[in-house]
Image (spheres, rainbow, N blue to C red):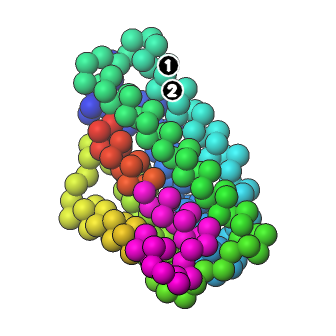
Amino acid sequence: MTTPDNYSQTSSGRSAEKLLRLTAQAWSDALAALLDSDPDAARRVLRGSRARRSAVGAAQTYVRREVAIGEVHGHCLVQAFNSLQLVADISHIEDLLIHLARRVLAHRESLPAPDQPDVDALRRAGAHRLNDLADGLSTPVMDSDYLLCGCELIDVLERLVQRIQEPGSTSHGTSAGLCVALAASLLEASRHATRAA
């Protein structure tokens, strides 16, 4: 039977950890591609998509299998539900990263100068959070570093949204909207990961 203390040792726990680590690298590459107009980084995101989508499918399959064969009971059933939600959140993040990488390759995105520091902060904090989530699957790691990273994500999200809403803003492009969606999706994934731990 799966318990909170041994979840990360299950097949679903290991597949979720792999998915989070792959997504952390894609997150870093996609936002670096946007920041630097770097087609090589954008291509890395696209090349890694198959492995990430496979990891999404594996994580979903393992959790569903554990539920179906009765390995999950009580509180762990709530964990399993939130694990499925986490995988869905990461799958959504994957879609956003692919969209961003394709836009960079099509030369349809230029990042306004005022957005660059926030996008760089989003790149660093987001990759850090995804790796933290992979590290903390068995127990939620709510140390000061984790909390500071969450505060940074919220701050970046708020600043990007505020700039998008300013009259005459140069942040109205799709890149700013994708960055807002990425930050919001990662915060939602963090919520589900905490409940799944």
- Where does residue 32 sit, x and y in percent of width and height? 59, 74
According to the image, label 1 marks what residue?
65
Looking at the image, the residue that sits furthest to the front is 167
Q: Nearer the viewer, residue 52 or 34?
A: 34
- Where does residue 120 sit, x and y in percent of width and height? 49, 77
Q: Label 2: how many residues lie within 10 Å, few (<14), some (14-19) or many (20+)?
A: many
What is the span of residues highlighted in magenta in the rendered image? 160-184
Residue 29 is marked as: none
The residue sitting at 38% across, 54% down in the picture is 187
The residue sitting at 50% across, 39% down in the picture is 88
Q: Please tell me whether residue 140 is drawn above or below residue 102 in the rendered image.
A: above
Which element carries disc 1, helix, strand or loop? helix
Instruction: Report whether residue 9 is seen.
Output: no
Describe residue 110's horizontal placement relative to residue 144 as left or right.
Answer: right
Rendered image quadrant of residue 42: bottom right
According to the image, label 2 marks what residue?
62
Q: Are marks 1 and 2 in contact (CB under 8 Å)?
A: yes
Looking at the image, the residue that sits furthest to the top is 69
